[in-house]
Image (cartoon, rainbow, N blue to C red):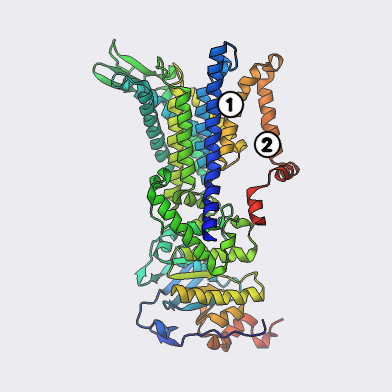
Amino acid sequence: MEKRLNGKRLSKASRSGFINYGIVIAAFALIQILLVVQKLLGVTLVSNSLQSLLVPTCCYIVMAVSLNLTVGILGELSLGHAGFMSLGAFSGIVASFLLADVIPFAPLRLALSMIVGAAFGAVGGVIVGVPVLRLQGDYLAIVTLAFGQIIKNIIMVLYVGVDEKGFHIAASSERFNLAEDGTAIIKGPMGAVGVTKLASFTAGFVLILITLVVVQNLVNSRSGRAIMALRDNRIAAESVGINTTKYKLMAFVTSAALAGAAGALFGLNYSSTVASKFDFNASILVLVFVVLGGLGSIRGSIIAAALLYVLPELLRQFGDIADYRMLVYAIVLILVMLATNNDQLKALVGRIIPKRKGAASHG
Amino acid sequence: MADKKQFEKGKMVPVPSVSIIPERDLGTTPILECSHLGIDFGGLTAVNEFNITVGRTEIAGLIGPNGAGKTTVFNLLTKVYQPTRGTILLDGLDTHGKTPAQINRMGIARTFQNIRLFNNLSVEDNVKIGLHNQEKYSMFTGILRLPKYWRQEKAAHERALELLSIFNMEDLADHQAGSLPYGAQRRLEIVRALATNPSLLLLDEPAAGMNPSETAELMENIVKIRDTFQIAIMLIEHDMSLVMGICEGICVLNFGQIIAKGTAEEIQSNPTVIEAYLGKQQEGGAD
């Protein structure tokens, strides 16, 4: 009896996780096959504009899954997730530049840059999280909102470069005394320029898998249960001996680190990146993915991020509608929201696909 | 429930702090000693001069009319509120300045008057969260799924089912906690509290909303829990059949003050207690 229960339970928790890995791997394989077939037959299956969206889509999937860790699983609202992405992007760009001579092998350099991005994201998470997560209420939303703006404004005036005397960093162009033969990596409002594009779709795919491993395994562990306990009932969680600040911080910093890694990949996908790309709208975009995908649902985040990021581009192809594509995008968002809140529709879906919890209560 | 079951109770003996503890607990440090405990909310004194001693294996009762401050006492003991004055000694250790989470790790577990479960999680996960501090592996062990993770998760799973079996709830392990019937939610809360391996279990109205047969079963289970785990249990309850049936030492609270302490027999015949519950006789009595 116990053995059977044990087997059933473990498989249920991990089954959902394996489906997510399966979806990601299948999508990756499908796109790779399409790309190969396209090359062999010389027909256009995946347009150039769509191909250029592959890496950013991967980044935004990672962003959505990591934000879901904060919003859906920890239950704290964060409005500055793009701020951590920005930290990761620019630190990753600088790291890849500095490592260019040391490590000629591009994938390794990309991996190290993403680790540096993740580390900067994590540090940002600690700086925001330590004071704010001690408080209860909506303070995290307010502070992360400000954090996103602050990071954007700081990077707008930041000058970073290297010459033979070493590494230069300054907060204005006058004080940026780079030698003639030096190279500027970040040039204030112009952002990072002359970036070697290291990012690849495969790297994005690997980053998504790593993110899924981290988030899903975290959720199904002792720490993850503590995090969800805090979301469901803080007072009860404290009463069973859970250190609230520690686990809030754990979830938030993990989320920020993953956003940093996604940012590094994003930054290394373009030859130039400006800080204003990671503004409040970008944060809200990721939040939209998370909310529409379903709070706490990892699979929902993946699918919502992939579809909604590509949707505006797909709409561009249909000649006449192209002008109204943002309108269509907005209508799709509204329809999805109406549909997911419609009890009759939910009941219909529930009849077609029996809900797992409901099924459990019958057995 | 016509047949009144007789529960075995320990003989009560006086201890220095004008309290009584079971005779079998003499010679050991009392699990809980409160002296001059009190809290003010603004100008309002909610609890004052709360002195109590609870023996290591005692089942103690805390009763009183609505608004007497019973739950406030529990909140003081678990540091949801920091006391304005007085000391709480848990197993001889001062709990001054501790957080609710630290108090739990020191050995006090509790349930809540208005049930506080982790509603979106499964019954088993609720118990596993109670086992949180008995599992010892880091976040990275969990993410990397090292052998230690599998070992400890297996142990936690088995322990959770074992604890759920106290109330015959193993079959509900996969259910969502929030979807359980009311009585089962109350029982799950007790299991979750027990999972934290406490030496003192505080139950806030465990029988609220239960029918007489459920209450009788609960009484047996409370005694069973005390006997198997050898812990002290302190409970707040309005159901006098439960309190008088299983509580060894009873403490009556009214307007934040202790008005009587003693065994069930002493409390039942105490005129101050009768007055607090029913009002003064010459003023027309209870209507």
Question: At label 2, which amino acid type do we have?
Answer: Met
Residue that carries the numbered disc 2 in the rendered image:
A337
Residue B284, placed above or below residue B47: below
Dot 2 or dot 1: first in sequence order is 1
Q: Chain of mark 2?
A: A
Q: Quadrant of residue B103?
A: bottom left
Task: For marks 2 and 1, give the CA distance.
Answer: 17 Å
The residue positioned 71% from the left and 14% from the top of the image is A320
Residue B220, placed above or below residue A191: below
Disc sitting over residue A309 in the figure: 1
Q: Nearer the viewer, residue B135 or B155?
A: B155
Residue A314, horizontal then vertical, whole percent? 63, 20
The residue positioned 52% from the left and 31% from the top of the image is A25
Q: Nearer the viewer, residue A166 or B59?
A: B59
The residue positioned 62% from the left and 85% from the top of the image is B4
Q: Secondary structure at mark 2?
A: helix
